[in-house]
Image (cartoon, helix red, strand yellow):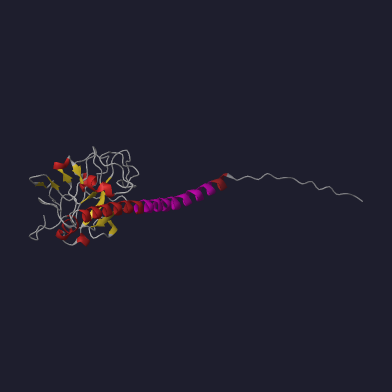
Amino acid sequence: MQKTHRRTHAGTFGFTLIELLVVIAIIAILAAILFPVFAQAREKARTASCLSNQKQIALAIMQYVQDYDESLPLSEFAGGGGATWENVINPYVKAGDAVGTYTRSGAIWACPSFAHPEEWSQYKGLDNVFAWGTPITLADVDEPAGKIMVFEAGSNFPPSDPQTWGYRDSTSAEWFWTSTYTVPAAFAKDCDGKFPGDWGGCNRYPRYRHNGTSNFVFIDGHSKALPKGQLSWYKHIWRQNFNGTPW
């Protein structure tokens, strides 16, 4: 009986250059599709964290209001050692770093989407608009559901304290500036720490860091993310004078 010997050849197979290029192209296409999705998902998480920070700050403000006869905190207490509204509400704030330092990374005072963590990101309140000689109470605020209490602010460099509802010393109140903007509000573009322009007022403007939106907490307690162009300067940011005309 004749045995038939079959020789098996272990063939070696490899990718051709064209096949490799096709695989690389597919990976590049998938990366181009998925990376923006992942980036948006991360930004949504940062947006939620930022809004949580602002809600905690707003809650601290309202706790202060309850303890001080419904009065909103002043922007800066000139007769009290230079204390700001941050100082007076800090005892009500959880997880907040010491106010007055420039090391707020990770604390609720810093927006997690701030692009320059080596500098000072900040949240702020309305710029000196709720006081004229005396603290303003909640009852004095017209349309609390339409007036912003806390928002994301730009960062000055060198940094300076964010301001809010009013500056008062023993004799007078100081209004830092008046609006020259029309409705809807227009905001400075280059105010997030590293910029060549006018830095003096950057912490007075909202920053739209979250996929073109910014978080806002209103005096009645509700909060929302808004895109640019949704705010009217005199309606949402500046209060009306006691005679009914806007400041």
Image coordinates for residue 21, horizontal then vertical, percent: 53, 46
Q: Is residue 211 visible?
A: no
**Magenta stretch, main secondary structure class:** helix
Image coordinates for residue 238, horizontal then vertical, percent: 16, 55
33 left or right of 237?
Answer: right
Image coordinates for residue 168, horizontal then vertical, percent: 12, 46
Residue 66 sits in quarter: bottom left
Q: Which residues are magenta?
A: 21-47
User: Does the magenta segment cover residue 33?
Assistant: yes
Residue at point 33%, 53% (across, down): 52
Residue 9 sits in quarter: top right
- Between 229 and 204, the one lying in front of the other is 204
Q: Is residue 59 visible?
A: yes
Instruction: Please identify the quadrant where the C terminus is shown.
Output: bottom left
- Between 173 and 147, the one lying in front of the other is 173
233 left or right of 50?
Answer: left
Q: How many marks?
A: 0
Image coordinates for residue 193, horizontal then vertical, percent: 27, 41
- Between 123 and 90, the one lying in front of the other is 90
Q: Is residue 31 above or below residue 197?
A: below
